[in-house]
Image (tube, helix red, strand yellow):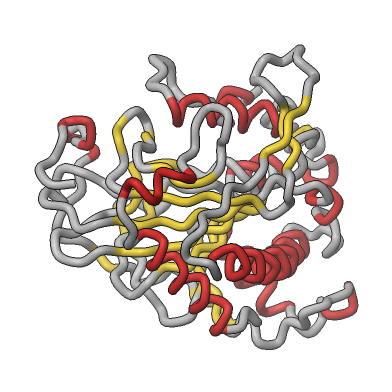
Amino acid sequence: MGEVDPAFIQDPEHRPKISFTEAQGIPLIDLSHIPTHSSDDVTAVNEGVVREIGDACKEWGFFQVINHGVPLEKRQRIEDASRKFFAQSLEEKRKVRRSDKEVLGYYDTEHTKNVRDWKEVFDFTIEEPTLIPASHEPDDKEVTEWTNQWPDYPTELREACQEYAQEMVKLAYKLMELVALSLGLPGNKFHGFFKDQTSFIRLNHYPPCPAPDLALGVGRHKDGGALTILAQDDVGGLEVKRKADGEWIRVKPTPDAYIINVGDIIQVWSNDKYESVDHRVMVNSKRERFSIPFFFNPAHYTLVKPLEELTNEQNPAKYREYSWGKFITNRKRSNFQKLNVENIQIYHFRI
């Protein structure tokens, strides 16, 4: 990527500080006592964990989990395959390049808030195929299928990705159960929304950047879905905007931990009790960085709105309902073309 093209340069107020505050405080939660196949009778045992998750969602919107039950070898397998894929020539990678028609696969010109990100990515969905609205137009009822594009090399990538994806889905259900309990809801409250999930996984590669003070790996943003589960390597670079004072805080990599953040959908479902928080990724001039986020997203036909159990006369609904499928098709548009309007956000649905 050589010299820095102006397309990558952040406006002065969004440029990263090269010295940074490393997070003391992003909670580290131990899931070792949470059964893999839980039912509501596990709640008594885990009141402490449920409370920790509730506090983390309220105060940070982010937390880390250890002893999460994902086998380390499955994580290592997808990480190794990802490194091999990105080490290929651009010409090879572009054989599975995404386009307006093929929305999954390889991409190296993603924009966040209309500034180009210093990264390359490979996206694949969990459900094959994934059903999505054909357009962002509210009255268009047509549905289209997203299908994965798998590269020829590395040959093990597809299987490594699919096996890892199943582990992510298991962990996501377990986490959603804890989030539900922390809101005083039945553990399985959210499960039905994910029957035809639109979840996807992204392999990220951030090459060394000659001007890490001007560009970002990913510009500041909030995640539009329900929950994100991130595996990051030991290089670090993720920064979270601390709710208490608006400071950008670097999340220190913890070996074999996952970083979890609440997305916009949980913010709406919880009627603002839990908040989706701004985060961004710094790059550095010496070391490349790899990460693998899993975005747990509901079925496209989900109408997202505050849950009735969490609203009443004293605490009325703060959002009107919106279609999740139309929300993502809107978002996808702005990743491909610089629109002059701001990307669709949940506050557009605020009452």
Quick check: 278 above or below 205? above
- Identify which residue, 99 or 186, lies in the foreground: 99
- Identify which residue, 317 or 70, lies in the foreground: 70
Quick check: 79 above or below 274? below
Q: Quadrant of the C terminus?
A: top right
**Residue at (50% x, 63% y) in the render:** 230
Does any portion of residue 136 appear in the rendered image?
Answer: yes
Instruction: Indicate left or right for 179 with 293 as reference.
Output: right
**Rendering quarter of residue 345:** top right
Number of marks drawn: 0
**Residue at (35% x, 57% y) in the render:** 205
Does any portion of residue 250 appear in the rendered image?
Answer: no
Quick check: 25 above or below 308? below
Q: Position of residue 173 (x, y in %)?
A: 74, 64
Q: Position of residue 168 (x, y in %)?
A: 65, 66
**Residue at (72% x, 35% y) in the render:** 145
- Identify which residue, 241 or 104, lies in the foreground: 104
**Rendering quarter of residue 167:** bottom right
Quick check: 284 above or below 69? above
**Residue at (42% x, 82% y) in the render:** 255
Q: Position of residue 210 (x, y in %)?
A: 11, 51
- Identify which residue, 301 or 77, lies in the foreground: 77
Q: Position of residue 116 (x, y in %)?
A: 30, 35
